[in-house]
């Protein structure tokens, strides 16, 4: 028999092969291109103050995006995480004020656990009742937000009441440039973000549980036959996505010095846009931490640079919409070509 | 008796469940707050508030029939109202009698503009879903942002306030003692019911939702049919936008955001299968009535709007659970 | 008996919700033999596979492995005993690389938590080396052609040190050449002392490779023995239970100058069809025989408007038509009853009536409105004319038997008054009684309505009994026709012979 009779359809070398195997490079190239264009329109883009603030803006969106990535890898979608994030943040801070506690580690643990619990609720509905994730998370998100606003409180906690050590932690700076009034610093939270991303990367890439998430995205039946526990995998996915949201929520409140229970409404679309831009497929099984981080970076770059580009910020929604449609369109086109490729030679 | 029983057994279990729910909500509210709930005013106000939401739910159901979804309905509704409002302001001036007393002709043009936006927006959604094969969730999330964004760019943020009187009548008026928006809704829902149950397009839509592959082999025009379902959804959304702006005398890019969940909830509660193939207008109407009774009851009982939101969400989860249990048994 | 059977099944019975799937099946597989289990869809093959792999618990009978009874066989135990199944869909992860697909099962079996890519890669290289094939380990499985996916599945199964490899319909989606490659691999596996159980309803390949054959029908063994005792027609008859004495169909005499219903000349589709020319007259049933991947189905799809980029000329009743969409084909009077009734033909949860009128919706509408009563009437007429066995057309079509479902599908197209009817596997999964009835109905349609019929089938007796002419297809080309006017038995022998010559 001749083994060469079974060629793969992948181009084996060159740029196309690279992009086919690691689409992250395409997103990276896009980000770089955008930076060059924006920098050419307004050289102020390259000033450290702007670059640092861009990186800072990556943190919360990025952590949330990692959670969405997990859900999308399994072939689902999550729109409940902003509500979970804000609920975890608000409840934690409210609790801290009530008992007069000020600290850093314990609050983050509590917020993460609240998020975890809410995420597990999603898992129960998605796995136990076999319901489409979009509809489940639409329901849990609205219910949680409604309960928070109606059952707890709808008023925001301002900086004078916020736990001071939490704020101090969130505003730690890694390095500063310049001095006096003109000095700018890079938020240390970027480091937190990188650590979490590295953790999720290790999970997805180097643990069997993580590979189980990809396997589930490839197909539930094969995953079952191979011996994965689909139930446990779903609990992991939605639980971890919830936990990441809880953590990101508290970080968000600490970074902006305000705990507003109405915050982040509608931000699910931005985060989903960033994840899709990073190459993850809504059909599951495709996407990576690196791609998602690049997607978030590109997305934040695009939406935060409108002012620098002298474009009215009212255009932001239009830009976000175009990003979603464009990125999803490219993914659909790629999937269709793939299907057509695989469909050949079938039949009798 | 046995004839009745057999007839009852033939009723769709989803519809039966809904009827029961409606009766239960009604009885519960009448029992808890008989004085304040059992007043004509309560039911009258429902006929003014429910239609705009009902139209969105019907639109949602139409796209769910093929396993899709239209998350851009709110964006289309607001953009339709805003563009009509801008047209009126351009023709009749931004304030005063010129605007309020605008003749039937320009108002009709405004209606056509609004419906035209629904048509175009729906056509864009349909093209992205049916022709470009983009997942409906992402395609309509994206276009929803684009429509909202265009509305924001056009208005700069604040609401467009002040519409002609006759436009307001579409959202506020009564005809023979019945709320005009309710009439518009019944007319539109009746038309959609007819389209789904009695036209080759409607039957084809359900067949495609049942099995897109078999539909292709049966020679059905799947691309065109799916595309048309999004056009229909867009037009229904813009009609909702007309009623909404007529009722509130204003149009804004971020009105009615909470309607999205409620529209999905009513569609799912009304027996629509979000995976495609099943859904009906009577189911939507029943679910709409049940939830509207519930929400006015809750308002009478002085529940905060936020808690009402919570109940909507919890209700959606509950109806999912009930549907799951029913299909598991059946 | 020289040696003990590797796996022996004795009087196995199994019921599902009161319906008997297996009724006392006995089967024995010797070490290192290539055994074939044949049977039509629904004959109990899949259930039997699941019994041997421990997925299905049995209701009666005994399973013996190496002569020892295995009363509590579950999937884990079956794998430990060396029984591996390669499912028809391969059960691979399309989005993961070949290397990971090959090794992730082993990682799971070993109960690891942390995966080592180096260890997985070494494992995968070993798997590929053992099979003796070259596969790009870094490619994702979805980028491989079907044959490549199958090799991955085989390589993965071999890494579990099997002694019996069960392959479910392994040749279904392969081209003729790929089947040869597969058989080469299977013989090498056998040379290592591993037994292989082929499970298939396509008998052509079995003859080439198997040593022993067991035929299942309706949950019972109806024939078994060394393969040389069977020829193709005999296997088919055993599988279907049909008798040979079906009267051969003699179509009406065609006038030499009559315009044919369908005339195809120089039809080519890149990679699928190559310069195909033939004609089908009114009242004629033309059979198309060919091996897997011969292009038979592609020819049907091209005629049904599903290969819009074809080259060549197609004429219906003398008129040239351009069939670049299904709608064009149906408007030209071409009807197609597809191969896979359940996914391509029927709307399973919908009613029988809806399924019947599905292709005639515009015709049954006036000003866009469907004439409900008219639709019900024509559906009822169709149920009667096609003798679909049901008390009412309001039942879901999935409650019907295979034969009645097929009648619904043929009836669906008759509503459109077609001029050409293409049937792909017209009686696959249909029980014997209904089979003859469907054949009668097709013949009647050809004679009475003057339809041109193209019948594509693996079932040699079916083709020989029902077709005026039989064309042979191979690698996308027509390779001549079988002479007409022979008695069915001689035709069968000749067709078997010719098909064997092609491979």
Image: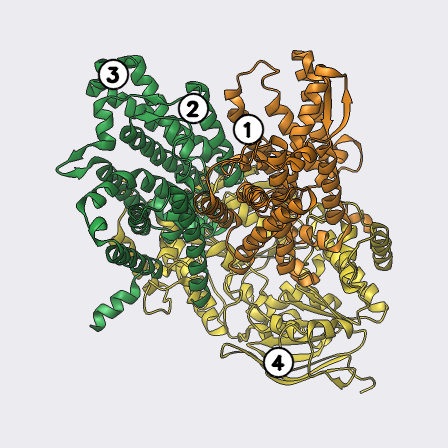
Chain colours: A orange, B green, C yellow
Chain containing the residue with disc 1: A
Is the C-beta separation of discs 3 and 4 under 8 Å?
A: no
Q: Are marks 1 and 2 in contact (CB under 8 Å)?
A: no
Structural crowding at the residue carrying mark 1, measured as other residues with C-alpha within 10 Å and reported as few (<14), some (14–19) or many (≥20): many
Residue in the image at 81% along x and 49% along y: C135
Residue C6 visible? The answer is yes
In this rendering, is residue B85 above or below A266?
Answer: above
Please, which chain is the residue tagged with disc 2 on? B
Q: Which residue is mark 2?
A: B151
Where is residue A86? Give x, y as percent.
55, 41
Residue mark closest to the camera, 1 vs 4: 1
Q: Are marks 3 and 2 in contact (CB under 8 Å)?
A: no
Task: Name the residue that disc number 1 marks.
Answer: A320
Of the numbered discs in the image, which one, if any, rests on residue C64? none
The foreground one among C367 and B243 is: B243
**Considering only order in the chain, which callout, 2 or 3, is on the residue closer to the N terminus?**
3
Under circle 4, the secondary element is loop
Q: Nearer the viewer, mark 3 or mark 4?
A: 3
Residue receiving disc 3: B99
Q: Which residue is mark 4?
A: C58
Image check: C64 left or right of A67?
right
Percent position of residue A4, x then y:
81, 48
How far, Cα to Cα, is label 3 from label 4? 81 Å
């Amino acid at each position: 028999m001749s083994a060469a009779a079974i060629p793969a359809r992948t181009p084996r070398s060159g740029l196309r092969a690279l992009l086919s195997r690691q689409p992250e490079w395409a997103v990276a190239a896009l980000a770089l291109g955008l930076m060059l264009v924006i920098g050419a329109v307004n050289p102020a883009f390259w000033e450290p103050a702007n670059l640092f603030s861009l990186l800072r803006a990556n943190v919360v969106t990025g952590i949330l995006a990692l959670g969405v990535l997990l859900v999308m890898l399994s072939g689902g979608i999550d729109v409940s995480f902003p509500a979970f994030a804000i609920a975890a943040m608000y409840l934690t801070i409210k609790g801290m004020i009530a008992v007069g506690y000020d600290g850093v580690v314990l609050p983050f643990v509590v917020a993460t656990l609240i998020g975890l619990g809410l995420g597990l609720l999603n898992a129960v509905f998605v796995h136990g009742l076999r319901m489409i994730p979009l509809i489940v998370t639409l329901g849990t998100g609205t219910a949680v937000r409604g309960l928070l606003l109606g059952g707890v409180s709808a008023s925001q906690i301002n900086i004078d009441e916020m736990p001071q050590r939490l704020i101090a932690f969130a505003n730690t700076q890694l390095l500063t440039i310049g001095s006096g009034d003109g000095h700018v610093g890079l938020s240390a939270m970027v480091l937190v973000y990188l650590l979490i991303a590295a953790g999720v990367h290790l999970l997805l890439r180097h643990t069997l549980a993580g590979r189980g998430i990809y396997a589930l995205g490839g197909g539930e039946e094969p995953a079952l036959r191979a011996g994965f526990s689909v139930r446990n995998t779903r609990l992991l996915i939605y639980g971890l996505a919830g936990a990441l949201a809880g953590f990101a929520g508290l970080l968000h409140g600490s970074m902006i010095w305000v705990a507003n229970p109405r915050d982040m409404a509608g931000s699910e679309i931005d985060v989903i846009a960033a994840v899709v831009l990073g190459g993850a497929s809504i059909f599951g099984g495709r996407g990576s931490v690196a791609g998602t981080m690049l997607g978030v970076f590109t997305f934040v770059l695009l939406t935060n640079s409108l002012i620098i580009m002298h474009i009215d910020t009212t255009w932001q929604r239009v830009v976000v919409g175009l990003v979603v449609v464009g990125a999803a369109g490219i993914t659909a086109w790629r999937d269709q070509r793939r299907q057509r490729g695989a469909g050949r030679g079938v039949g009798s | 008796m046995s004839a009745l029983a057999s007839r009852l057994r033939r009723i769709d279990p989803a519809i039966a469940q809904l009827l029961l729910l409606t009766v239960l909500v009604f009885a519960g509210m009448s029992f808890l707050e008989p004085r304040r709930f059992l007043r004509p005013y309560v039911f009258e106000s429902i006929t003014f508030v429910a239609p705009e939401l009902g139209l969105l739910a019907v639109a949602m159901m139409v796209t769910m029939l093929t396993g899709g979804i239209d998350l851009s309905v709110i964006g289309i509704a607001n953009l339709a109202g805003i563009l009509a409002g801008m047209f009126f302001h351009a023709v009749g001036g931004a304030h005063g009698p010129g605007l309020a007393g605008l003749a039937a002709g320009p108002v009709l043009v405004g209606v056509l503009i609004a419906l035209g936006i629904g048509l175009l927006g729906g056509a864009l959604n349909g093209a992205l879903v049916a022709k470009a094969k983009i997942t409906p969730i992402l395609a309509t999330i994206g276009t929803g942002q684009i429509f909202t964004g265009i509305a924001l760019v056009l208005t700069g943020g604040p609401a467009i306030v002040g519409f002609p009187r006759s436009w307001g009548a579409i959202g506020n008026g009564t005809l023979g003692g019945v709320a005009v928006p309710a009439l518009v809704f019944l007319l539109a829902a009746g038309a959609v019911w007819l389209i789904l149950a009695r036209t080759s397009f409607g039957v084809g839509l359900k067949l495609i939702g049942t099995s897109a592959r078999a539909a292709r082999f049966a020679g059905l025009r799947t691309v065109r049919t799916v595309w048309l379902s999004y056009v229909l959804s867009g037009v229904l959304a813009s009609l909702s936008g007309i009623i909404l702006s007529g009722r509130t005398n204003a149009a804004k890019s971020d009105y009615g955001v909470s309607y999205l969940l409620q529209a999905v909830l009513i569609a799912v509660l009304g027996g629509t299968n979000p995976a495609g193939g099943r859904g009906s207008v009577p189911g939507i109407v029943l679910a709409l009535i049940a939830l509207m009774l519930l929400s006015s009851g809750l308002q009478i009982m002085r529940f905060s709007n936020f808690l009402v939101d919570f109940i909507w969400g919890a209700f959606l989860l509950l109806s999912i659970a009930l549907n799951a249990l029913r299909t598991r048994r059946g | 008996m020289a040696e003990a059977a590797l796996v022996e099944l004795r009087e196995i019975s199994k019921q599902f919700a009161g319906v008997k799937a297996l009724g006392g099946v006995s089967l024995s597989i010797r070490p290192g033999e290539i055994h074939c289990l044949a049977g039509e869809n629904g004959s109990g093959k899949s259930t039997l596979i699941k019994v041997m792999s421990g997925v299905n618990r049995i209701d009666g009978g005994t399973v013996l492995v190496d002569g020892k009874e295995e009363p509590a066989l579950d999937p884990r135990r079956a794998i430990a005993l060396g029984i591996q199944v390669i499912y028809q869909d391969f059960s691979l992860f399309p989005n993961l690389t070949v290397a990971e697909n090959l090794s992730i099962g082993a990682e799971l079996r070993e109960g690891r938590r942390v995966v080592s890519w180096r260890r997985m890669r070494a494992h995968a290289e070993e798997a590929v080396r053992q099979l003796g094939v070259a596969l790009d380990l870094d490619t994702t499985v979805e980028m491989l052609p079907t044959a490549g996916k199958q090799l991955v599945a085989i390589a993965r199964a071999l890494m579990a040190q099997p002694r019996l490899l069960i392959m479910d319909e392994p040749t279904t989606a392969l081209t003729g050449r790929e089947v040869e490659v597969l058989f080469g691999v299977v013989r090498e596996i056998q040379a290592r002392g591993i037994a292989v159980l082929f499970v298939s309803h396509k008998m052509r390949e079995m003859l080439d490779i198997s040593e022993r054959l067991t035929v299942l029908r309706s949950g019972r063994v109806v024939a078994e023995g060394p393969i040389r005792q069977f020829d193709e027609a005999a296997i088919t008859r055993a599988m279907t239970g049909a008798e040979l004495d079906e009267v051969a169909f003699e179509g009406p005499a065609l006038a030499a100058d009559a315009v044919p219903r369908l005339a195809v000349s120089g039809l080519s589709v890149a990679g699928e069809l190559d310069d195909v020319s033939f004609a089908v007259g009114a009242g004629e049933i033309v059979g198309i025989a060919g091996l897997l991947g011969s292009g038979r189905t592609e020819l049907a799809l091209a005629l049904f408007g599903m290969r819009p980029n074809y080259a060549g000329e197609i004429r219906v009743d003398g008129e040239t038509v351009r069939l670049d969409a299904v709608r064009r084909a149906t408007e030209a009077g071409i009807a197609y009853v597809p191969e896979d009734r359940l996914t391509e033909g029927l709307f399973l949860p919908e009613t029988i009536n809806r399924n019947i009128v599905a292709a005639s919706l515009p015709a049954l509408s006036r000003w866009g409105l469907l004439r409900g009563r008219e639709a019900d009437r024509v559906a009822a007429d169709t149920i009667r004319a096609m003798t679909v066995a049901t008390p009412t057309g309001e039942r879901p079509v999935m409650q019907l038997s295979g034969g009645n479902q097929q009648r619904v599908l043929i009836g669906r197209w008759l509503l459109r008054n077609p001029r050409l009817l293409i049937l792909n596997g017209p009686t696959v999964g249909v029980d014997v009684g209904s089979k003859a009835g469907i054949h009668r109905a097709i013949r009647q349609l050809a004679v009475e309505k003057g339809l041109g019929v193209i019948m594509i089938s693996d079932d040699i007796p079916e083709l020989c009994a029902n077709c005026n002419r039989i064309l042979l297809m191979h690698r996308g080309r027509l390779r001549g026709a079988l002479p007409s006017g022979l008695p069915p038995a001689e035709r069968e022998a000749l067709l078997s012979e010719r098909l064997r010559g092609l491979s």
